[in-house]
Amino acid sequence: MSVHISFDGEQLSGREGQSIGGILLANGHRTWRIASGSERGIFCGIGICQDCVVTVNGAEGVRACQRTACEGDVVEREVRA
């Protein structure tokens, strides 16, 4: 079964049960956040480093490596100084 999410307006698909980070990586996105002027994506993959945080359905600071993607999720980049 597949799941579909939106990332900055782009429609992406992945497998049911896959993390948001996994779907982003599988669709060619290696970075999706900017912090201190540097691009960030998954670094540790277990929720400790917080490099992969995104906004999901309006909620900021969601760890993409930990959050299971749900059908119709709206995912947006976060930019932090």
Image (tube, helix red, strand yellow):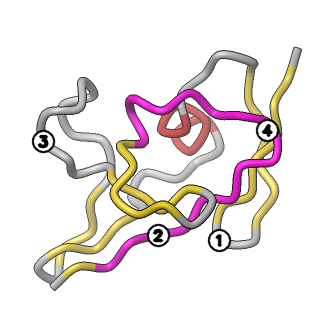
Q: How far is disc 1 from disc 2 in space, using C-alphas?
A: 7 Å
The amino acid on which the numbered mark 3 sits, given as a three-letter code, is Cys
Residue 50: x and y in percent read 20, 47
- Assess disc 4: are there few (<14), some (14-19) or many (≥20) residues with their C-alpha within 10 Å of its C-alpha: some
Closer to the chain start, of discs 1 and 2, is: 1
Residue at disc 4, secondary structure: strand
The amino acid on which the numbered mark 2 sits, given as a three-letter code, is Arg
Q: In the picture shown, does residue 79 fall above or below 62? A: below
- Assess disc 2: are there few (<14), some (14-19) or many (≥20) residues with their C-alpha within 10 Å of its C-alpha: some
Residue indicated by mark 3: 49
The amino acid on which the numbered mark 4 sits, given as a three-letter code, is Ser
Residue at disc 3, secondary structure: loop
Label placed on residue 39: none
Screen quadrant of the C terminus: bottom left
Label placed on residue 8: 1
Stretch in magenta = 64-79
The amino acid on which the numbered mark 1 sits, given as a three-letter code, is Asp
Residue at disc 2, secondary structure: loop
Closer to the chain start, of discs 3 and 1, is: 1
Residue 11: x and y in percent read 81, 57
Screen quadrant of the N terminus: top right
Nearer the observer: mark 3 or 4; the answer is 3
Closer to the chain start, of discs 3 and 4, is: 4
Q: Is residue 77 magenta?
A: yes
Q: Residue at x 33, y 54 (%)?
A: 53
Residue indicated by mark 4: 13
Residue indicated by mark 2: 77
